[in-house]
Amino acid sequence: MTLDEFVARFAEEFDETPEEEFKAETVFKDLDEWGSLTALSIISMVDEEYDKRITGADLRSVSTIEELYNLVESK
Amino acid sequence: MAYNPFSLEGKTILITGASSGIGRGIAVECSKIGAKLVISGRNEKRLQDTLSQLQGEGHLALQADLSTQEGVDALVEQCPPINGFVPCAGIPKMQSVKHINRKDLEEIVWINQEVPIILTTELLKKKKLQKKSSIVFIASLSGIFVANMGESIYSTTKAAISGFAKGAALELAAQGTRVNTICPGLVPTSILEMSNEMFSEDQLMESTKGKYPLRRLGKPEDMAYAAIYLLSDASDWVTGINMKVDGGYSLL
């Protein structure tokens, strides 16, 4: 998956936040909609798309979507 | 003085999922109060670790992979006559409702829900469960009393087990056999590591702070003491209940 595709897939997990707010450099934890449900959705999405397990600690260790992408790719 | 209405002397108890966590805790405590244990688990080495922690003589370890019907059948075949049965083998999976897929659903339902039911049926059919036995299912707060984010499938299976326990309690009462569930609050064990390793123990402490009126998380021993009560003759008039052991979590 390319970075752009990852950003688009990431955005799909959100219901309220407009799609155009999601960029590679977006600090996702600053989004109003970020919370335990969206975190769970992102973990489930990575599991589904990559068959890889990321943890709550992984999510806390990065700030932008691109950093998360790199972390997932490196797993 | 040896007055002890909770003694398990003379009882043989089958415990699945005994190689770690709550299953191991229940096995160890039951052995201390006089039971003979038949323990099963998938991981031979960890199962032997549990066996070495049991007190007294005459225990039996049966390695079993319950992910297949063959594994389930083999366990029933090898099991000696028993007076108690505590299926503890279970898997969690943190997953949002939007991401549930059939493969995960079937895997979790099989291990958490179908295997305990099939084992009960087969143990009865093969006359392994003696008259006046006690069956103790490990259910959960989740699905029966509360809901937690990401646990929809897990709680589905636990609610199903609670339903099965009531039906079985009614039917098996004729032979004096009792069927109950224990509904644990959060017990930090390796099962949580399997649930996508979402939390470290510190994070668990932090995220659950203030949610447990008795101000700590659960221990396998907490579940073991409840299991001892339900397995012993002290609970001879108790069947079909869901026993919450949750530090008061569900009060809030």
Image (spheres, coloured by chain):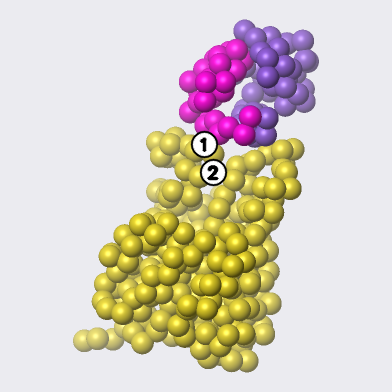
Chain colours: A purple, B yellow
Disc 1 marks which amino acid? Met
Q: Quadrant of residue B227?
A: bottom left
Kindly identify which numbered label has been placed on residue B195.
Answer: 2
Q: Nearer the viewer, residue B151 or B53?
A: B53
Q: Quadrant of residue A63?
A: top right
Callout 2 touching callout 1 (CB < 8 Å): yes
The subunit carrying tag 2 is B
Disc 2 marks which amino acid? Ser
For mark 1, does the 10 Å Cα neighbourhood hold few (<14), some (14 to 19), or many (20 or more) residues? many
Position of B202 relative to B34 (above/below): above
Would you name the residue on which mark 1 appears?
A: B198
Q: Give the spatial CA distance, label 2 vs label 1.
A: 7 Å
Q: Main secondary structure of the magenta part?
A: helix
**Label 2: element kind:** loop
**Label 1: element kind:** loop
Q: Residue at x 72, y 43 (%)?
A: B100
Tell me where the magenta segment starts and ends, as one range. A50-75
In which quadrant will I find the N terminus of chain B?
Answer: bottom left
Task: Inspect this view and state whether residue B242 appears.
Answer: no
Q: Are marks 2 and 1 on the same chain?
A: yes
Q: Residue at x 45, y 74 (%)?
A: B14
Kindly identify which numbered label has been placed on residue B164.
Answer: none
x, y percentage for residue A6? 68, 18
Q: Residue at x 27, y 78 (%)?
A: B57
Position of B117 relative to B248 (above/below): below
Q: Nearer the viewer, residue B103 or A55?
A: B103
